[in-house]
Amino acid sequence: MLLDAGGRVLLLSALLWRLAAAGNPELPTAVNITWSSINFKTILQWQPKPSGYFYTVEIHGQISDTKKKCIMTTETECDVTDVLRNVKETYTAHILSVTSSGMDNFEEPPFAVSEKFTPYSQTVLGKPEIQNYTQKDSKLNIVFQDPLTPYTFPNGSFQSIRDIFQHDLEYKLYYWKDQSSGKKDAITKSQKFEVSVENTKNYCFYIQGIIPSRRENRYGQESMVLCTSIGRNILDEYGAEVFIIIAVIAIAVITLAIVLSVILCKRKKAKAAREKEPLNGV
């Protein structure tokens, strides 16, 4: 059966497309895809570095529309923070491998799929910032600030993790006597601690955010360790070892002084005895 001119053109086009596809093997897809998120700033990372092709990231939510990020990139990471604003939604990332004209093809490009990620339950709590602390009498008072997130209010100010987690957020204080290893702890839902301490001892401490409702990633990053200073003496600074060394030296000096005194006393007596001997002989 003979084909008309239109049919021959379609057949030729199909043959040429198949030949082109046979000469362009499937592109490599991303591997080792990981989500890295602190205070809701979320970076997607993967491997390998592309050669002769590009990556495009698609973020798929359970209820939200698919969003593209880092289109035609040669990097192996992508900041996806701004498309995860519904922090309680669960997302997956599709990392597409495309050529320079790959996005125009009717056929879907090869892609890799990440594990599921829910920012509310998986982002890591960052370090609280300690603003002020005082030790007066038998009380240690500490004031600190919530970590900020990349998300903003309509007025442009940044939301803190407290603005998002609200009553789910707690903080834990760990404190101990300076030069000691025995730790105590306290919990608060506010931005300050007040704990009872010994008024003659210095204390060290740090703070950590907690989300008790989580099954994993409950504990956040630890703040820097700070110590109070209420007039440190040499024993506080250097420990009991210095006191022992000083005591040993003092005992040695006293012992040496006694020994020298005894020797000198015996020599004086011996000299006096020798001086009396000629007189007794006359």
Image: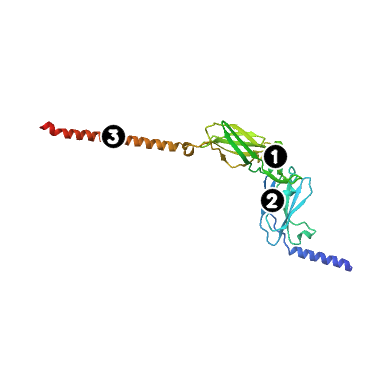
Image: 3 above or below 158:
below
Q: Residue 232: x, y in percent?
A: 50, 37
Q: Earlier in the sequence, mark 2 or mark 3?
A: 2
Q: Which residue has dot 2 on it? A: 44
Mark pair 1, 2: CA separation:
24 Å
Q: Which mark is residue 270?
A: none
Q: Quadrant of residue 173?
A: top right
Q: Secondary structure beneath disc 1? A: helix
Q: Which residue has dot 1 on it? A: 162
Q: Quadrant of residue 20?
A: bottom right
Q: Are marks 3 and 1 in contact (CB under 8 Å)?
A: no
Q: Residue 280: x, y in percent?
A: 12, 31
Label 3 packing within 10 angstroms: few (<14), some (14-19), many (20+) = few
Q: Which mark is residue 261?
A: 3
- Residue for point 70% across, 39% down: 162
Q: Residue 90: x, y in percent?
A: 74, 44
Label 2 packing within 10 angstroms: few (<14), some (14-19), many (20+) = some
Q: Residue 119: x, y in percent?
A: 71, 44
Q: Are marks 2 and 3 in contact (CB under 8 Å)?
A: no
